[in-house]
Amino acid sequence: MDDNLFDQLVSSVEHAGAIRREEKVASREFEYCAVDVKAIREATGRTQESFAQMIGASVSAVRSWEQGKRHPVGPARVLLAMFNADPKAADELLHRAAG
């Protein structure tokens, strides 16, 4: 490994440690709003299995989201936001795209 790159890595780890010890403030923070996947799914009137199939996710992912063990990210989060805003319209758009 390049010495300069290694020094940058060490500096980054030290900075992270200082943030964790509250000696420094993070330069940026990310906030994620919780998504109530179960309520969104129930608004569609679908089972976990059919909902997972419809949005292209695994059933285990949907279960984990509903139980709060994992959180949807990326395209799944966007699809869930669409279903949360308007379940009928999102369902129609997905069926139109698939057919």
Image (spheres, helix red, strand yellow):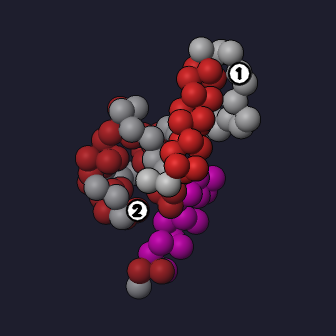
Above or below for 94 versus 82: below
Quarter of the rendering occupied by the C terminus: bottom left
Report x, y in % for residue 33: 60, 36
Q: Earlier in the sequence, mark 2 or mark 1?
A: 1
Identified at 63% across, 53% down, the residue is 85
Q: Nearer the viewer, residue 14 or 55?
A: 14
Q: Which residues are magenta?
A: 78-96
Can I make out residue 34 in this image? Answer: no
Q: Which residue is mark 2?
A: 55
* Amino acid of disc 2: Ile
Q: Nearer the viewer, residue 1 or 97?
A: 1
72 lies left or right of 90: left
* Amino acid of disc 1: Lys
Report x, y in % for residue 22: 65, 15
Report x, y in % for residue 63: 31, 41
Residues under numbered marks 2 and 1 in contact, where contact means CB atoms less than 8 Å apart: no
Above or below for 18 versus 77: above
Q: Which residue is mark 1?
A: 24
91 lies left or right of 23: left
Identified at 59% across, 43% down, the residue is 8
Q: Element at badge 2? A: helix
Q: Nearer the viewer, residue 90 or 26?
A: 26
Report if residue 81 lies within the magenta region: yes
